Image (tube, rainbow, N blue to C red):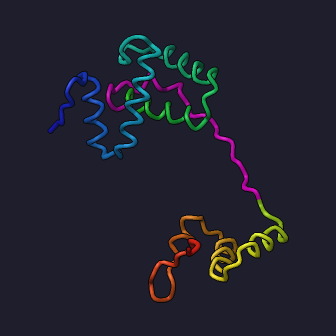
């Protein structure tokens, strides 16, 4: 069963159906469609007429525009889905390889900086939450979701 989108080309509808069959998230589907649309805009013709050289030139175009490695890899992934799954032409993507994403090390606070950070909060509950977060490596969202012994969320927002 296809859910026809009014005004969608048969090629776009096929790609949408392929993504739905694989249960890709709506956000991923929108991203892949955007990527193929931008590639078609670059080509100034239908993307199903692209060649290996067109794809190579598009990747160079993105690099020259300063596209980040993460965005470049997202574009390659969306195009890979389009060419390998929707068009069933994996040979076109054979030379398109993801780029290395530089690893950025986190900033590590000195013991004195940690002490000053925790002491800067005047509230014992906030100091406890910060100490626990730092000592266990919790993320901010995990700290916000902490529960007390009775199972209630521990509000760490300042009370008015």
Please tell me which residue is depicted at 19% across the width and 27% down the height of the picture.
6
**In the image, is 99 to the left or to the right of 155?**
right
Q: How many marks?
A: 0
Name which quarter of the figure residue 19 lies in. top left
**In the image, is 1 to the left or to the right of 102?**
left
- Say whether residue 94 is magenta: yes
Name which quarter of the figure residue 116 lies in. bottom right
The image position of residue 93, as x and y in percent, is: 47, 26
Asked if residue 30 is positioned above or below residue 63 in the image, the reply reads: below
**In the image, is 159 to the left or to the right of 113?**
left
Please tell me which residue is depicted at 25% across the width and 29% down the height of the picture.
14
Per the rendered image, the range of residues in magenta is: 85-107
* Quadrant location of the N terminus in the rendered image: top left
Asked if residue 64 is positioned above or below residue 145 in the image, the reply reads: above
Q: Nearer the viewer, residue 40 or 54?
A: 40
Q: Nearer the viewer, residue 120 or 151?
A: 120
Asked if residue 106 is positioned above or below residue 149 in the image, the reply reads: above
- Say whether residue 36 is magenta: no
Please tell me which residue is depicted at 50% across the width and 36% down the height of the picture.
74
Judged from this view, the residue extending furthest toward the left is 1
Please tell me which residue is depicted at 37% across the width and 24% down the height of the picture.
89
């Amino acid at each position: 069963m296809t859910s026809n989108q009014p005004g969608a080309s048969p090629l776009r509808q096929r790609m949408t159906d392929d993504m739905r069959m694989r249960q890709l998230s709506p956000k991923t589907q929108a991203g892949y469609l955007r990527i193929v649309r931008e590639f078609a805009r670059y080509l100034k013709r239908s993307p199903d007429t692209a060649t290996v050289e067109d794809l190579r030139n598009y990747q160079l175009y993105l690099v020259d525009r300063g596209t980040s490695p993460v965005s470049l890899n997202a574009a390659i992934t969306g195009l890979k889905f389009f060419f390998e799954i929707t068009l069933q032409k994996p040979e076109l993507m054979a030379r398109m390889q993801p780029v290395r994403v530089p690893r950025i090390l986190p900033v590590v606070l000195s013991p004195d900086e940690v002490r000053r950070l925790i002491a800067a909060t005047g509230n014992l509950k906030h100091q406890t939450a910060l100490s626990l977060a730092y000592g266990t490596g919790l993320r901010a969202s995990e700290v916000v979701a902490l529960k007390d012994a009775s199972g209630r969320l521990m509000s760490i927002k300042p009370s008015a």
